[in-house]
Image (spheres, grey):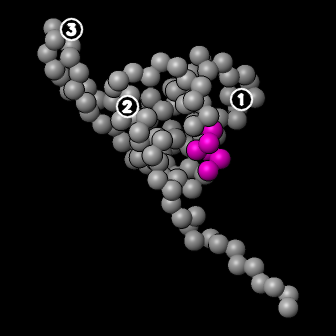
Amino acid sequence: MRKLDLTNYTFTAKNQQGINQFVTYQFKDALVNVITHQNLGLNGPEMLEIDPVVIKIEKANLEVILTEDDYKKIITNFRKFRGFGNNDRPFLKRVYNCPEIPDDGKKVIKFSNN
């Protein structure tokens, strides 16, 4: 399992006048938009396959717990997406470096029949 931080962050960017200003990066919105982006060319079954992950992300507040399957779906769509820019580097690092967490301690102990 993985825990993904969904909090927004700020970065500085130059406006049209060349003045640095703080911009808020809407992390959760960007994540949902990337994994469902039209340019990925997802067909119906692929969109329905990613939909439970999208719902899980949209319902979460500050962080979301992802199964390995959820995480693999996100990474698969990230690899297909074209168009990331310089300001997306912290976004990408957060997703690709998403920490693994224990599986809530629900380990199955098997006993031998000896």
Is the residue under label 1 in contact with that under label 2 (CB below 8 Å)?
no
The mark closer to the camera, 2 or 3, is 2
Q: Please tell me which of labels 1 and 3 falls first in the chain.
A: 3
At 16% from the left and 20% from the top, the residue drawn is 20
Please report the bounds of the magenta region as a residue range.
68-74
* Residue 36 visible in the shown view: no
Q: Position of residue 45 (x, y in %)?
A: 75, 29
Disc 1 marks which residue?
46
Position of residue 34 relative to residue 101, above or below, is: above
User: Relative to residue 80, is residue 7 drawn left or right?
Assistant: left
The mark closer to the camera, 2 or 1, is 2
Disc 3 marks which residue?
16
At 57% from the left and 37% from the top, the residue drawn is 75
The residue nearer to you, when weighing 73 against 55, is: 73
Which residue type does callout 2 highlight?
Arg
In space, the residues marked 2 and 3 are separated at their CA atoms by 22 Å
Disc 2 marks which residue?
89
In space, the residues marked 1 and 3 are separated at their CA atoms by 39 Å
The residue nearer to you, when weighing 90 against 29, is: 90
At 37% from the left and 31% from the top, the residue drawn is 89
Q: Position of residue 37 (x, y in %)?
A: 56, 21
Position of residue 35 relative to residue 94, above or below, is: above
